[in-house]
Image: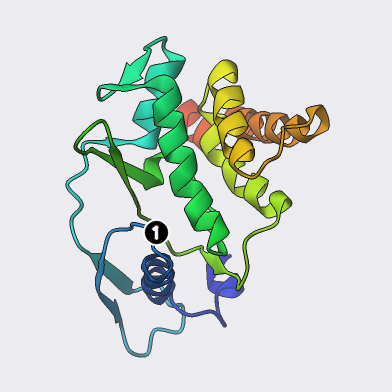
Amino acid sequence: HKRLLDRFKPSKALRSWNGTCELLRRGVSAASPVAWFERESDPGLMQNYYLCEYVPAEFTARDMVGAFAAGQTSFAGVPEDEAYRQLAAYLLRMHGGGILFRDLSGGNILIHPGAAGKLVFSLIDTGRIRVFQKPLPLGARFADLVRICNKMHLAGRAKFLSIYLGALKLKLQWWQQWRFVAYDFKVAAKRRVGRKAWKQLFSRPGR
């Protein structure tokens, strides 16, 4: 289906190059681009490659929110509230710069512990980015945040969203939370009946 839907788009490698360049242009840390390659006469655009610099990250945001969900009160020496505050500041910079990431899962946010209790964030897998010339509206920001919030425990999610929206001088309204609940339900349903579930079913011993 991607051969059909992406037929008139740039290759994924070129989109990744462009997305990363846009992040860096707007002061958002990302793995620096090195090169992109496309095979000539490849109408399906399936044989293309994007190369970026290695990021010496020790963790991902998935590790961080997972640690807090498991009951830890700090991560890499940084207290929970402060870690959420630093992550929120990083994402606020991106959204304020007009970047809609569209795949903001925890595994795509790399983390390296810096000096003086600072967490250094860096984005990878930038091929789905959309760029706008003004800060994103709240609805677009929520469309990005549902993915990273999906792995947070409820108390942690409330803290993170309170910090993020507080920087915009806003408060999370009860009706806005349904967007996150709906995404949680979508992910849970996908795991039960989606491709991964079928794969697990037929990979069981004796099948």
In the image, residue 88 lies at what x, y percent? 49, 40
Left or right of 178: which side holds 73? left
As drawn, 60 above or below 81: below
Q: Residue furthest right?
A: 175
Q: Residue furthest top?
A: 71
As drawn, 81 above or below 41: above
Q: Is residue 126 visible?
A: yes
Q: Quadrant of residue 34?
A: bottom left
Residue closer to the observer: 81 or 34 = 81
Residue closer to the observer: 114 or 65 = 114
Residue occupying image coordinates x 43% and y 71%? 22
In the image, residue 166 lies at what x, y percent? 62, 36
Quadrant where the N terminus sits is bottom right
As drawn, 149 above or below 123: above
In the image, residue 52 lies at what x, y percent? 24, 64
Q: Quadrant of residue 19?
A: bottom left
Density class for disc 1 (Cα within 10 Å; few <14, some 14-19, many ≥20) is: many
Left or right of 178: which side holds 21? left
- Which residue is label 1 attached to? 28
Secondary structure type for disc 1: loop
As drawn, 8 above or below 31: below
